[in-house]
Image: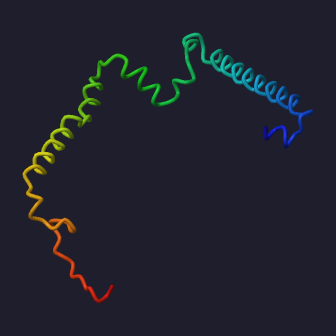
Amino acid sequence: MLGTIVLGPDKLPGMISQAARVLRKVRAFAEDAKQEIRAELGPEFQDFEFEDLNPRTFVAKNLLADDTLGLRQIRDGFRLDDEAEAVREAVRTAGDSVDLTQQDPGRAPDRPPVPYDSDAT
């Protein structure tokens, strides 16, 4: 709708087809560049994927696929789900044992009461 307002209804289809043509040319250029790089690298790199240059993809594909280094165990060691659940349970149990009826509901239990001046309001 914005394209119709800016370009007009008569020029919009032409602009869309021109943009699609440019996009096809850019994709073809990128694919040709990839093929040329693969040809220059040699036959041992014919299955090389440029997405593998992303560090996350490289690690997942080459190091985590076969766990010969024990990286999965190291990664799982950083998961603290069990410890977090133990802390939650301790907080729940401690909260159940605190007698909230003896405390002033308007202030935190570990802070002294703030003096209130009724004339100031």
- The x and y percentages for residue 73 are 25, 26
- The x and y percentages for residue 33 are 70, 22
- The x and y percentages for residue 11 are 90, 34
Quadrant position of the N terminus in the picture? top right
Apparent side of residue 106 relative to residue 38 in the rendered image (left or right) = left
At x 8%, y 57%, the residue is 99
Closest to the observer: 90 or 28? Answer: 90
Quadrant position of the C terminus in the picture? bottom left
Q: Which quadrant holds residue 70?
A: top left
Apparent side of residue 100 relative to residue 40 in the rendered image (left or right) = left
Closest to the observer: 78 or 86? Answer: 86
Q: Which quadrant holds residue 116?
A: bottom left
How many circles with numbers are drawn on the protein?
0
At x 9%, y 55%, the residue is 98
- The x and y percentages for residue 112 are 16, 74
At x 69%, y 20%, the residue is 31
Colour scheme in use: rainbow
Closest to the observer: 121 or 3? Answer: 121
Q: Farthest bottom residue?
A: 119
Q: Farthest right residue?
A: 10
In the image, residue 38 sits, relative to residue 78, either above or below, namely above
Apparent side of residue 43 relative to residue 57 in the rendered image (left or right) = right
Closest to the observer: 18 or 94? Answer: 94
In the image, residue 61 sits, relative to residue 15, either above or below, namely above
In the image, residue 78 sits, relative to residue 50, either above or below, namely below
At x 13%, y 51%, the residue is 95
